[in-house]
């Protein structure tokens, strides 16, 4: 593996397995049998608040144990709590951990993959020392306060303001589609600090303490019935200047660092479809008696080929310090794969997809189909990804902009 000597990789793998074997049980990943167990196929979780609270506690305790045992941030600088090893080993450990029955990483994905890279690349020394270790250890859940009702794909049009007030800033505005805001201790906040500057140059990024007056978090009910996302209202919320990430006015640059990392994580090995889900689709084909149907087998083959393509791409991306354009490609492949799987299930099931007949494993795909579009927006819409690749990689002419300010 690039960047890691074979003997170092073998020694690390043995050490990681010893830790995992001593602290967790091996996971049975095979799809047991059609009709056994719960048939829901979740994509965006809709946990009961009490269940979610327990899951968060268990996930935090596990991440802390992993970190304290030396596996929490293998590629990070020792100064800030990392192990000072090759970043490649972080992915090696992640893959090994998927073989064990341990709490998931979802609660801490924004902390590790979005806020932490922004602080590491742009934050002050004091900010790095204050936040990086707890972000990777699982002490803090983070949320991403970027999108607004009038600034989604056009993120630079953000209108939430931060005005100088003594040794800090007063923030006013509204954010939307904010995952985990209801359980987060900190948020990565993009705010406008200079209304007179061109819109890409008048923004500043902050670390926001979510546990303070003036912050109102409200759930957003989705068409699935769940409330995975939130909207956040900010009313004269105080942020100390020491929590500023980078100089005033470079918020767009910091946001790009965050979004590049997010796109890589959305389409990364942490998000690619698992073997059990593909086996579930194969089981559906068998249940419907379409094992020999050429169109059904072709559809399954396309899913398998796309899954393998994503895994190979992620292996290349994980060897780089920053995913760059590969992050946009991975994110596009992932959202297209979700759509491919959902549409395949819908075409196979026909009427059974639209109404609950009570048959195991049929109507359960509906939740998956309704949740899948949400991943087309995470980290930037598919259309934004295509523009990034067309203009930044292929050198095609820029798309006409209606607002060039």
Image (spheres, rainbow, N blue to C red):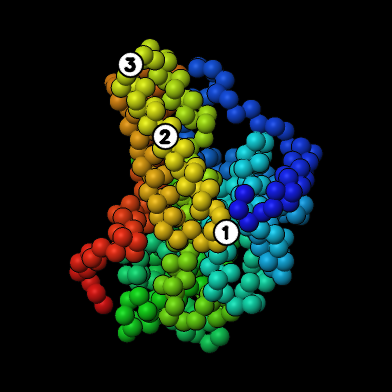
128 vs 365: above or below: below
**Between tags 2 and 3, which lies in front?**
2
Position of 382 with respect to 139 (left or right) is: left
Q: How far apart are marks 3 and 1 (CA)?
A: 45 Å
In terms of image quadrants, where is residue 390?
A: bottom left
Outermost residue, bottom direction?
166
126 vs 95: above or below: below
346 vs 328: above or below: above
Dot label at residue 111: 1
Instruction: Name the residue beneath numbered marker 2.
Output: 305
The residue positioned 47% from the left and 37% from the top of the image is 308
Instruction: Name the residue beneath numbered marker 3.
Output: 293
At label 2, counting other C-alpha atoms closer than 10 Å, the crowd grade (few under 14, some 14-19, many 20 or more) is: few
Marks 2 and 3 close (CB-CB < 8 Å):
no
Position of 269 with respect to 386 (left or right) is: right
At label 1, counting other C-alpha atoms closer than 10 Å, the crowd grade (few under 14, some 14-19, many 20 or more) is: many
Marks 1 and 2 close (CB-CB < 8 Å):
no
Pick the front one: 308 or 134: 308
The residue positioned 50% from the left and 17% from the top of the image is 34
The total number of labels drawn is: 3
At label 3, counting other C-alpha atoms closer than 10 Å, the crowd grade (few under 14, some 14-19, many 20 or more) is: few
The residue positioned 47% from the left and 78% from the top of the image is 170
N-terminal-most mark, 3 or 1? 1
Residue 79 seen by the camera: yes
Pick the front one: 67 or 130: 67
Q: What element carries label 2?
A: helix
N-terminal-most mark, 2 or 3? 3
């Amino acid at each position: 593996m690039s960047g890691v000597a074979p003997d170092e990789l073998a020694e690390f793998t043995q050490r990681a397995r010893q830790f995992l074997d001593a602290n967790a049980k091996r996971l049975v990943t095979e799809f047991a049998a059609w009709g056994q167990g719960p048939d829901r196929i979740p994509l965006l979780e809709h946990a009961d608040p009490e269940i979610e609270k327990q899951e968060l506690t268990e996930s935090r305790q596990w991440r802390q144990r992993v970190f304290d045992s030396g596996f929490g941030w293998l590629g990070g600088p020792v100064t800030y709590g990392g192990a000072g090893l090759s970043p490649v080993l972080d992915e090696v450990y992640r893959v090994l951990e998927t073989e064990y029955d341990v709490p998931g990483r979802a609660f801490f994905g924004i902390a590790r993959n979005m806020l932490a890279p922004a602080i590491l690349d742009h934050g002050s020394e004091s900010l790095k020392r204050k936040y990086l270790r707890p972000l990777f250890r699982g002490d803090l859940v983070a949320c991403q306060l970027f999108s607004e009702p009038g600034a989604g794909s056009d993120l630079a049009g953000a209108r939430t303001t931060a005005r100088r007030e003594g040794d800090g800033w007063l923030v006013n505005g509204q954010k939307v589609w904010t995952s985990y805001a209801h359980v987060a201790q900190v948020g990565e906040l993009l705010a406008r600090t200079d209304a007179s500057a061109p819109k890409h140059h008048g923004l500043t990024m902050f670390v926001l303490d979510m546990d303070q007056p003036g912050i109102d978090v409200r759930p957003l009910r989705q068409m699935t019935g769940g409330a995975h996302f939130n909207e956040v209202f900010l009313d004269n919320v105080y942020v100390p200047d020491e929590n500023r990430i980078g100089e005033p006015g470079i918020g767009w640059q910091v946001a790009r660092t965050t979004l590049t990392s997010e796109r890589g994580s959305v389409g990364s090995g942490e998000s690619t479809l698992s073997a059990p889900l593909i086996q579930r689709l194969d089981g559906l084909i068998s249940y419907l008696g379409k094992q020999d149907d050429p169109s059904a087998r072709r559809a399954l083959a396309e899913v398998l080929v796309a899954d393998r393509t994503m895994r190979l791409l992620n292996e290349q991306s994980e060897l780089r310090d920053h995913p760059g354009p590969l992050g946009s490609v991975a994110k596009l492949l992932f959202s297209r794969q979700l759509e491919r799987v959902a549409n395949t299930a819908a075409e196979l099931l026909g009427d059974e997809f639209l109404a609950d007949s009570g048959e195991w494993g049929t109507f359960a795909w509906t939740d998956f189909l309704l949740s899948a579009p949400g991943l087309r927006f995470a980290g930037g819409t598919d259309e934004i990804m295509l523009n990034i690749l067309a203009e930044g990689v292929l050198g095609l002419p820029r798309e006409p902009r209606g607002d060039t300010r």
